[in-house]
Image (cartoon, rainbow, N blue to C red):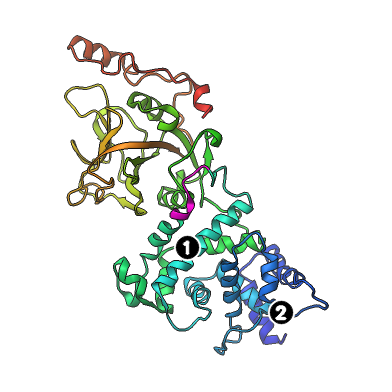
Amino acid sequence: MGNAESTSLQKYLSRFLPKEQAVIDGIFNKLLGTEAGATKKAKAVTLEMLKVYVEGTLPESMTVRLYNGMRSVDPTGKAVPPSDSVSKEQLIVFLSDVLRGIAEEKGALILSMISGSQIGTVKGRQVTEFTEDLISSLLQVLKHRKLLKDWSLDQTRDSAEGIKLLATQLTCELRPAGEELPAGKLLEADCDLGSIEDWVFRVSSVPTFLSLVVSQVLCIQLSEGGVGNLLPECRDVHWSKFLSILDLPSVMYLNSQLPVEVQHQWRLLFSTRLHGESFSRLCGLVVHKGPTILVIRDSQGHIFGGFASHSWETKPQFQGSNRCFLFSVKPSLSVYMCTGYNDHYMYLNHGQQTMPNGLGMGGQHNYFGLWVDSNFGKGHSKAKSRCTTYNSPQLSAKEDFSIDVMEVWALGEPPEDAPSKTKKSILNADPEAQAMMEMTGKVRQSEGLWEPVEEEEEADK
């Protein structure tokens, strides 16, 4: 290798710490030694070598894509066509661009992984197929490396549909020729290098997923370590007894939309499959537990919910902050943030005759963006044409819906003031209010229905 080439190589290696450089420098030799039947030391990596090295870790389709990305690297800067094999310098430049590069560098590699070349255009459909392949590969790698953080692929919703929905969500940000196109036209639109670079710059999940796949498959331990908050730690779930209506691609997407301080951990608080269909039980398990995500599947199969930025409290006033949002998981994966039109973020009330009793997010009384009635099992999502608080459409299949399954997850660390002993009924929590209700002749609707929830029971989910 000449002096100029050595200088160029050092420029790319300098993006890594010395201990990372040593690992990256040794990967090439590991790849060279994996070709079956090799009789002498090879000088370049072939596709077969890479396939053998990643066998069982990566789908073959993504292995070919990675190889196309590697061999498309042009260290000379002379616009030469992709090589027939991968040199050490090509591998190092590829790793440098994928793991530490800027959007322009990553965009060029992704284009070559889609089409086999860093020039020309690709259809939006091809970009979507690449994104599906990338998400599927990421899940396989996380499972193989035991990095699912106690989530279960088998006891969550089938990831196949979730992969397609997440890929559609990510690729809807493509802007061919700078234009925002509807989904149907986007699939057939031509995307050039500039479009891909812009997409990679604006949709950070794509380069993040690619970096994780490459680093985990090639066993490169980076200084930032692990998979970060890509998936939160899953707590308080016995998967032998529980089947979630969420899929892991949806969990990854929703978690990325949450405030950073609560992305590291999800704790299951309530599920109709575990705790039954009781509004009193729901309230007893979710109040004063910090930020939460609630997820509903209606009887028509639509899946949707909301993020509550603060602990739920039972009171006849709206609560929460502009960090709350509503979302849809199925039939589309989308998040709807606050508009600033009003502060009707969260509402929880129970046991009153003069105010609505139930749990709501967005909109207004009797016209919520998402509403779960205290007469549990019923709800509504009213948004003609959009929810004023979150600009969300109707989330359920029908405006008035029936709940099939509902889950509530607490996010981040439990609040310091969260009750740790036997939990009290929300009506028992304020004995003065209870006495006043009795004096005025108001009916305590949940009398005889509420059951104390012991700490041991909650731990044994």
What x and y, as percent, mark residue 161? 44, 54
- Residue annotated with mark 2: 44
What x and y, as percent, mark residue 198? 40, 72
Q: Residue at x 35, y 37 (%)?
A: 404
Give me the C-alpha separation between circle 2 and circle 1. Answer: 30 Å
What x and y, as percent, mark residue 41? 80, 78
Q: Secondary structure at mark 2?
A: loop
Marks 2,1: beta carbons within 8 A: no
If the image is split into quadrants, where does the N terminus sit?
A: bottom right
In this view, 104 is above or below 276: below
Which residue occupies the extreme top position in the image? 439
Q: Secondary structure at mark 1?
A: helix
Magenta region: which residues? 155-162
Q: Residue at x 27, y 46 (%)?
A: 397
- Residue annotated with mark 1: 132
Q: Residue at x 44, y 21 (%)?
A: 453
Judging depth in this view, the residue of 152 and 230 nearest the camera is 152
Q: Earlier in the sequence, mark 2 or mark 1?
A: 2
Figure quadrant of residue 276 = top left
Judging depth in this view, the residue of 418 and 90 nearest the camera is 90
Figure quadrant of residue 437 = top left
What x and y, as percent, mark residue 313? 32, 29
Which residue occupies the extreme front position in the image? 300
